[in-house]
Amino acid sequence: MSDNWIVANLQNAFETWNDKLTEIWALVTTSPQEFRDGAIWHIVENINGGLQAIGYALLILFFAMGIFRSTASFRDFQRPEYALKHFIRFVAAKAAITYALDIMVVIYKICAGVVEEIAGSLGGIGGATVTLPGAIETAIDEAGFWASIPLWLVTILGSLFITVMAFIMIMTVYGRFFKIYLYTALAPVPLSSFGGEGTSQMGLTFVKSYVGVCLEGAIVILACIIFSAFASSYTPSPDTGITTVTMVWKYIGETIFNMLVLVGLIKGADRIVKEMLGV
């Protein structure tokens, strides 16, 4: 770390950005069971098991509603195919409630396979990291006292903006991770809607939404790949032919623009997935 406060301020901001990128990579490639040594997952399992009783009660309600809605007369009950259809629906819905946790884990593993395949093609997050060029560091060190005053303002604003973007980015990814826990914990309740033909759309929407949340990890990884390619093809270079303040301001502005590309893609991951799945 440089002894110059201005340089150290920029280096700290870039280090925060790089640390959050590394954290994002680790978070997306970590399963819910492994996160925080499984402490949160243990709570999710208990809630999921506790809600099964409510799921069974709702299953009976939705099943009865489905029968009364689809039955024109009591003669329909005398038709074997009619009774068999509703019996199969009831058994399938009951199995979905009983094994709700296992179903959610299987869906996550399938989506995680997609994420791992995409992540394997990138190999790491190194291409998306940001460092301060030596030319700018030298120019700041050589700046006089009066020239350093506007540099303080420029670097403070730039560092603050970069730090805020880094935290917005990591909070978005954490939000996706905690949504997986919420969906898994509450799964028995919406899955019980499969017991009735008229209410099954609720369960279908729930499953599609959960798949979308799991696939947000793939969008995040793809966003990192796109950002890495974008950053490597266009790396801001300091213009030594202008004043130090202008050079630093121009470099920070171009760097922030590149960062906004990644932040925008990660923030829009849920919207992209919803449009893909039609949720």
Image: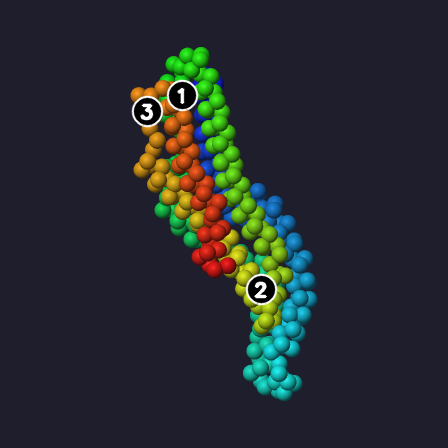
SS under mark 1: helix
Q: Where is residue 230 in the image (x, y as percent from the top left)?
A: 35, 40
Whether residue 162 is situated above or below residue 198 in the rendered picture: above
Residue drawn 48% across and 45% down? 267
User: Label 3, label 2: how many angstroms apart (C-alpha)?
Assistant: 58 Å
Distance (Cα) linking label 3 and label 1: 11 Å
Of labels 1 and 2, earlier in sequence is 2
For the N terminus, the image quarter is top left
Q: Earlier in the sequence, mark 3 or mark 1?
A: 3
Task: Give how far across and how far down residue 98 sits, in percent.
Answer: 61, 64
Q: In this view, does 264 lie to the left or right of 81?
A: left
Neighbour tally class for label 2: few under 14, some 14-19, many 20 plus, Cα within 10 Å:
some
Which amino acid type corresponds to the residue marked 1 in the rendered image?
Answer: Val
In front of the other: label 1 or label 2?
Answer: 1
Q: In this view, does 107 lie above or below 236?
A: below
- Dot 1, how many residues are within 10 Å of its Cα: few (below 14), some (14-19), or many (20+)? many
Label 2: which residue?
202
